[in-house]
């Protein structure tokens, strides 16, 4: 009688008898270099998928001898990674922005007007909109006004949002439709005046006065834009995104599209702090399907550093009369924390300035016991008083960072906060050592959607051409392994999803990315131009560079 070959115990446990027939599967990929990103950071050669989930990973010989699949793929020694996850982004916002003029990297208001004129030829609706301007790229780095917009578009309402989403410029026609004049007041924001007249520049909550009067898209237009956004996500390897702050209507729309199989991207939706959201979602407790998770509340403690809306303990180094803005009022934030704690929801608060971070660290401490596992998060944790770093560790508060912000901001950040405070800014290594792990996202559309850009920034602290040579404050760099974990398993953990995604292990969703390079060794200057070859979600190919 023929005897079966001896196989490793880890594979043999899949079978009662060594001579059992091959196990049936849907998909088998072999001859690859598969980063499982499991606890031991194992490198495998083959992976088997059944019913949308990983059935086994291991060596080619073992997997091929034990399984047969409906579809078999020779990876030709390509590299496979868990599906990339963005733990802090704005999927809905990005998708809706696809109808707007792209103002990214514009060098002047004159260039912005040129881009808007091109957009006007194909714009949806009666409003002309754009996003992505950054006055720090202008020759004169002052915040803009609406004078050129008024001259170019006197009869068309125009609304353009800064790259960080915390400032906007509206022309006079838009201000008129919104009912804004020199007497208009708003809490948590600013309508910037000059000689007693609105300049069109709106900061933080003042933006809502205009954005709220822009007519909504039709249902079919919204769905079409979401599908276009999803395609962009798959193109860069994203299989799961965290949408940081959504109303009830958007969350229910995503859920309905998921249930109807019209949308595939997995979404971790944070609730905006509204009575409608709280009354509808909180009493039900955390909600989770294979594609949608709702178990967190998103708060805004302050604005952004670029627009000087970040709340600082002392005035800005380059604006001595300004300490920034408190965006959500204290009563709202404390009540949100109380409700979230009562109903088992996570709290995730946008904190940029050292005062905002201090405020929320101390507020969290009123609700959290030391060494808890509630995973309340500080989103951005951008400028932190070094004396308060230990609060992250004591109360297991998760710093949810976006490493790409450090690279984007390094040209002007020290001017904003000064040489002393910069030591506690973008301090990724110091933050990670407090809790032992941290998620790393992009905050798109504030930054580009490609997760590899933030991956690169995390371990280099350099721009795309390798500057500065030693990295910006290089002592705060992460390792490549930590950077990869930040957009896979640690991103999943930040969402309480580490049991279903974030690594390629038995029982988890078969979400993965195929590339022809090793991210652990490739020359960093090449990373910005690396294409994703294929993206798979639930064992199905959703993107191929060849199609």
Image (cartoon, rainbow, N blue to C red):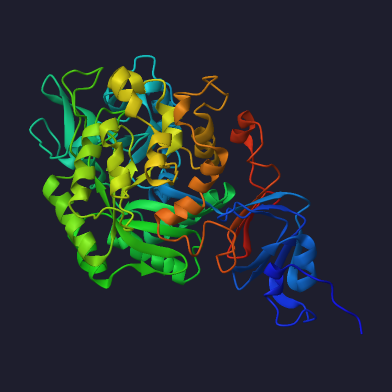
User: Is 438 in front, or is 402?
Assistant: 438
Front in this rendered view, residue 9 or 410: 9
Q: Front-most of 481 and 162?
A: 481
Residue that sits furthest to the left in the current view: 183
Q: How many marks?
A: 0
Task: Identify the residue at image location x=39%, y=19%.
Answer: 138
In the displayed structure, would residue 447 be above or below residue 14? above
Image quarter for residue 303? top left
Front position in the image: 32 or 190 = 32
**Which corner quadrant of the image does residue 109 belong to?**
top left
Q: Is residue 397 left or right of residue 459?
A: left
| Residue at the (30%, 37%) spot, across then down | 389
Give the residue furthest to the bottom: 1
Task: Tell me which corner region of the image, top left, top right, bottom left or bottom right, holds residue 341.
Answer: bottom left
Residue 3, compared with residue 364, is above or below; it is: below
Q: Residue at x 77, y 61 (%)?
A: 60
Q: Quadrant of the N terminus?
A: bottom right
Q: Name the spot of residue 37 as percent of width and height, x first.
A: 58, 53
Q: Residue 401 location, x and y as percent? A: 40, 41
Q: Is residue 483 visible?
A: yes
* Image coordinates for residue 38, horizontal then vertical, percent: 57, 56
Name the spot of residue 217 as percent of width and height, x first: 35, 54
Residue 138 lies left or right of residue 6; in this view the side is: left
Q: Residue furthest right?
A: 1
* Residue 385 in view: no
Residue 430, relative to residue 393: is it above or below? above
């Amino acid at each position: 009688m023929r005897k079966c070959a001896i196989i490793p115990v880890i594979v043999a446990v899949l079978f009662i008898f060594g001579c059992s027939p091959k196990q049936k599967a849907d998909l088998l990929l072999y001859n690859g270099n598969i980063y499982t990103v499991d606890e031991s950071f194992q490198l495998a050669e083959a992976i088997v998928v059944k019913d949308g989930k990983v059935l086994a990973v291991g060596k080619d010989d073992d997997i091929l001898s034990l399984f047969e699949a409906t579809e078999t793929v020779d990876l030709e020694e390509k590299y496979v990674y868990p599906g990339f996850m963005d733990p802090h982004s704005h999927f809905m916002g990005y998708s809706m922005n696809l109808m707007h003029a792209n103002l990214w990297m514009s060098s002047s208001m004159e260039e912005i007007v040129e881009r808007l004129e091109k957009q006007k030829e194909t714009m949806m609706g009666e409003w002309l909109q754009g996003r992505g301007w950054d006055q720090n790229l202008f020759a004169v780095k002052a915040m803009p006004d609406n004078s050129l917009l008024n001259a170019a578009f006197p009869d068309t309402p125009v609304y353009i949002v800064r790259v960080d989403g915390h400032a906007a410029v509206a022309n006079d026609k838009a201000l008129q439709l919104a009912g804004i004049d020199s007497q208009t007041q708003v809490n948590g924001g600013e309508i910037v005046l000059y000689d007693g007249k609105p300049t069109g520049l709106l900061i933080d909550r003042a933006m809502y006065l205009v954005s709220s009067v822009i007519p909504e898209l039709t249902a079919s237009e919204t769905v079409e834009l979401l599908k276009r956004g999803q395609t962009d996500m798959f193109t860069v390897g994203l299989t799961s995104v965290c949408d940081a702050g959504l109303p009830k209507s958007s969350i229910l729309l995503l859920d309905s599209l998921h249930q109807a199989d019209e949308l595939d991207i997995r979404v971790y939706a944070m609730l905006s702090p509204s009575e409608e959201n709280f009354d509808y979602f909180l009493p039900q407790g955390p909600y989770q399907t294979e594609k949608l998770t709702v178990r967190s509340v998103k708060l805004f403690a302050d604005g952004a550093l670029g627009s000087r809306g970040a709340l600082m303990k002392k005035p800005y180094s380059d604006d001595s009369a300004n300490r920034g803005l408190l965006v959500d009022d204290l009563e709202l934030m404390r009540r949100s924390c109380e409700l979230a704690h009562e109903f088992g929801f996570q709290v995730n608060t946008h904190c940029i300035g050292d005062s905002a971070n201090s405020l929320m660290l101390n507020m969290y401490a009123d609700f959290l016991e030391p060494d808890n596992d509630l995973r309340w998060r500080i989103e951005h944790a951008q400028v932190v008083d070094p004396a308060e770093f230990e609060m992250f560790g004591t109360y297991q508060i998760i710093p949810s960072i976006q490493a790409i912000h450090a690279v984007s901001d390094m040209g002007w950040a020290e001017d904003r906060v000064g040489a002393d405070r910069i030591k506690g800014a973008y301090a990724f290594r110091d933050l990670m050592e407090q809790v032992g792990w941290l998620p790393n996202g992009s905050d798109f559309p504030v930054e580009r959607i490609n997760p590899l850009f933030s991956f690169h920034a995390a371990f280099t602290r350099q721009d795309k051409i390798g500057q500065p040579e030693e990295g910006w404050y290089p002592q705060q760099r992460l390792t490549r392994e930590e950077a990869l974990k930040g957009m896979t398993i640690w991103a999943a953990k930040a969402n309480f999803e580490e049991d279903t995604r974030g690594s390629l292990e038995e029982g988890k969703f078969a979400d993965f990315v195929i590339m022809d390079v090793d991210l652990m060794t490739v020359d960093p200057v090449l990373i910005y131009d690396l294409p994703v070859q294929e993206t798979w979600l639930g064992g199905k190919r959703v993107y191929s560079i060849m199609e």
